[in-house]
Amino acid sequence: IDNGGWTRVRHVPAGSSWHPSTDRLAGTDVYGSPGTSAAWATAFDKSTVNQFMFATGDCTKWLITTPDAVGGAPYGGASYTNAYRTVVKSSTAAFSYQARWYNRATAVEDPWISLTDHATAVTNGDLLYGENGYARSTHNGVLKQHQGADVYIR
């Protein structure tokens, strides 16, 4: 996707729970065995990340964004609630656009990264990232329908 060069750093399988991570994409959580079908994460140096790609396991839904857009404490930014964040490109658009995401300091399941505004994404199965093993049925349909979800960096 987008000329490659991606390294997969997190995986959650099809099921009812999002990533077990709680590091807000800082790259410090390590668990599982990379390449297996169970949930896993490898460490990465956040200072070397130019872009993130969040994708469903079958890669039918994906988006590319920057660490600045993900923001929050790990990237020197403030937390945010339902704020517009920049998507560089996605499976639905070859051009940059904005979507409303969440990265609240007090919500351990954040950040929520989605193809569209969060509220719409929950309804339409367009969430691509969440943390803390979040398992509310309203938020996990995409995991069941699209072979889980992955995080890539470059």
Image (tube, rainbow, N blue to C red):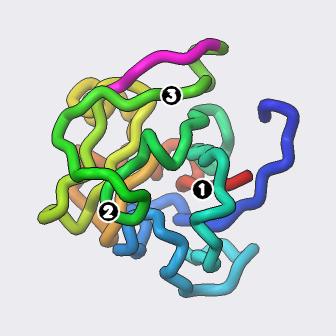
Q: What percent of the width, then of the height, locates residue 112?
A: 33, 48
Query: Which residue is drawn at the image coordinates 36% and 25% (left, top)?
Result: 99
- Measure the C-alpha gap from mark 3 to mark 1: 17 Å
> Residues at badges 3 and 2 in contact (C-beta under 8 Å)?
no
- Count of labels in the image: 3
- Measure the C-alpha gap from mark 3 to mark 2: 19 Å
Element under label 2?
Answer: helix
Residue under label 3: 87
Left or right: where does residue 69 sit relative to residue 3? Answer: left
Q: Residues within 10 Å of mark 2 (few under 14, many from 20)?
A: some
Left or right: where does residue 91 sit relative to residue 144? Answer: right
Q: For residue 98, what is the image quadrant?
A: top left
Specify start and end residues of the magenta stretch as a single range: 95-99
Q: Residues within 10 Å of mark 1 (few under 14, many from 20)?
A: many
Element under label 1?
Answer: strand
In the rendering, which numbered label is found on residue 55? none
- Measure the C-alpha gap from mark 2 to mark 1: 22 Å
Q: For residue 64, what is the image quadrant?
A: top right
Q: Earlier in the sequence, mark 2 or mark 1?
A: 2
- 88 up-or-down from 69: above or below: above
In the rendering, which numbered label is found on residue 150? 1
- Residue 108 visible to the viewer: yes
Q: What percent of the width, then of the height, locates residue 59?
A: 67, 40
- State which mark lies toward you, 3 or 1: 3
Please, what is the three-letter code of the amino acid marked with disc 3? Val
Query: Which residue is drawn at the image coordinates 55% and 37% (left, top)?
Result: 65
Taking the magenta stretch, the answer to whether it contains residue 96 is yes
